[in-house]
Amino acid sequence: MVDEFHHASASSYRGLLDHFTPRFLLGLTATPDRSDGADLLTLCGDNLVYHCDLFDGIEAGLLSPFRYLGVADDVDYAQIPWRSTQFEPTALEAALATEARAANALDQFTRHRDGPAIGFCCSVRHAEFMTDYFRSQGFRAVAVHSGPGSAPRSTSLEQLGRGEIDILFAVDMFNEGVDVPKIGTVMMLRPTESVILWLQQLGRGLRRVEGSIFWAYALDASAARSTRAACAAWLSANWSIRDRAVRARSGHVAMAAASARACSSAL
């Protein structure tokens, strides 16, 4: 049995899979799509045992319903150089780590947040800048990243889950393999062209708490065309997997569909 099976086409995983000859290989993943187009199903003999997408999980009560809010952003992404497959890191960081943008994010956070929050940033400096700004406004904030000066990962997540921290700003971590059920708000403060990354980050706010149902708020403060495209492409595609009329019986799914249309209109 292989968890996080969306990594299985990588050479490190393939070496392991080729080494063994199991009678039955079971791959588990919440994000089966890959940005490189690799076909994971062929590694399992094209045998799809079970499929449950995000909306199925919400309808079954396994995941929290969510409200996806697109926040106006005055960053002119057209002026940020594009290098290969991403924005030039230094220029992107300079555009995002500003007091005006932090103030906008804080305003949206104050108005819409529900429970502990996690904010995804583009760089260490961006995460630390956001942390310092939120702290200056009286919020309990920490930055967790791979560089020196990072708050301790495990302790910070535990404190976040207990409500001892208002928001945790992260850089390239906690996208997967982390379960903090009481996160009620996800702030997407960086642009992404990856549907997979976008979905993983959204998923941090969809964990259920035993005996309770929480609405998750996804505050997307990145107005980059690529991010809106990722949002719209995934929501629209998954909305059409099943009969929309059946899905629309559930109010939270209808809200998600409206969010998909809103994202599309922002492109």
Image: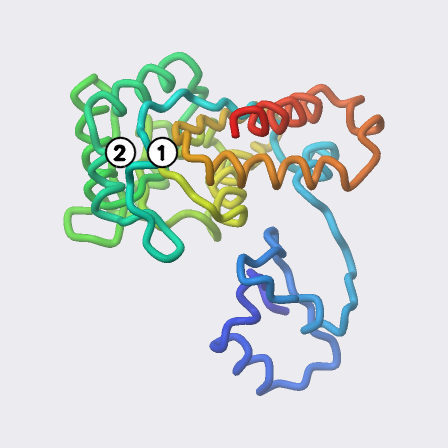
Examine the image and state in which quarter residue 137 appears. top left
Image side of residue 217 versus residue 125, left or right: right
The answer to whether the residues at label 2 and label 1 have Cβ atoms under 8 Å apart is: yes
The residue that appears at 70% across and 26% down in the rendered structure is: 253
| Label 1 Cα crowd, 10 Å radius (few <14 / some 14-19 / many 20+) | many
Question: Label 2 to label 1, Cα distance in Å?
Answer: 8 Å
The image position of residue 187, as x and y in percent, is 40, 30
Image side of residue 237 versus residue 207, left or right: right
Name which residue type carries label 2: Leu
Q: Which mark is residue 56?
A: none
The image position of residue 54, as x and y in percent, is 66, 40
Q: Which mark is residue 189?
A: 1
Image side of residue 64 versus residue 114, left or right: right
Q: Is residue 250 above or below residue 144?
A: above
Q: Is residue 214 above or below residue 17?
A: above
Name which residue type carries label 1: Leu
Q: Which residue is at the front of the view, 35 or 14?
A: 35
For the N terminus, give its image quadrant.
Answer: bottom right
The residue that appears at 56% across and 23% down in the rendered structure is: 67
Q: Which residue is at the front of the view, 208 or 76?
A: 76
* Sequence order check, earlier mark of 2 and 1: 2
Q: Which residue is mark 2?
A: 96
Between marks 2 and 1 in the image, the one whose residue lies nearer the viewer: 2
The image position of residue 117, as x and y in percent, is 39, 29
Examine the image and state in which quarter residue 9 appears. bottom right
Q: Which residue is at the front of the view, 38 or 139?
A: 38
